[in-house]
Image (tube, rainbow, N blue to C red):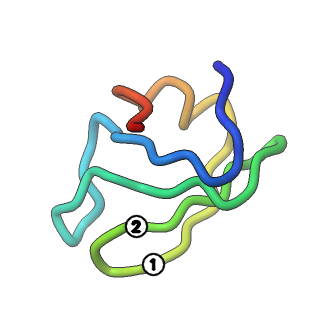
Amino acid sequence: MDIKAGDRVELKKPHPCGNKVFTVLRVGMDFKIRCESCGREVMVPRNKIEKNIKKVLE
C-alpha cells in the first residue's frame, strides 16, 4: 500500500470511542495513527494495519 504521513484512512474496526477515521502520523515498521474524534494516538504494526485499512480518504 502507498500510504504516507498525513493521509486519512478508514479502518474496518472502530476505535473504542466509535470513530473509524484516523490520521497517519508516522510510517515505518509501525504506523502511528491518531483518532480523529478523541485525539488518541496509537502505534500499530504495519502488517496489522494494512489488513485493517478499508480505504484511504481524500
User: Which label's residue is closer to the chain start, 2 or 1?
Assistant: 2
Looking at this rendering, what residue extends furthest in the top direction? 1
Q: Residue at x 49, y 24 (%)?
A: 51
Q: Which residue is mark 2?
A: 35
Secondary structure at badge 1 equals: loop
Q: Nearer the viewer, residue 11 or 16?
A: 11
Quarter holding the N terminus is top right
- The part of the image, by quadrant, that contains residue 46 is top right
Q: Nearer the viewer, residue 26 or 58?
A: 58
Q: Residue at x 42, y 56 (%)?
A: 22
Dot 1, crowdedness within 10 Å: few (<14), some or many (≥20)? few
Q: Is residue 49 left or right of residue 46?
A: left
Q: Whole-percent x and y of residue 8?
A: 46, 47
Question: Looking at the image, is 48 positioned above or below residue 14?
Answer: above
In contact (CB < 8 Å): disc 2 and disc 1:
yes
Looking at this rendering, what residue extends furthest in the left direction? 18
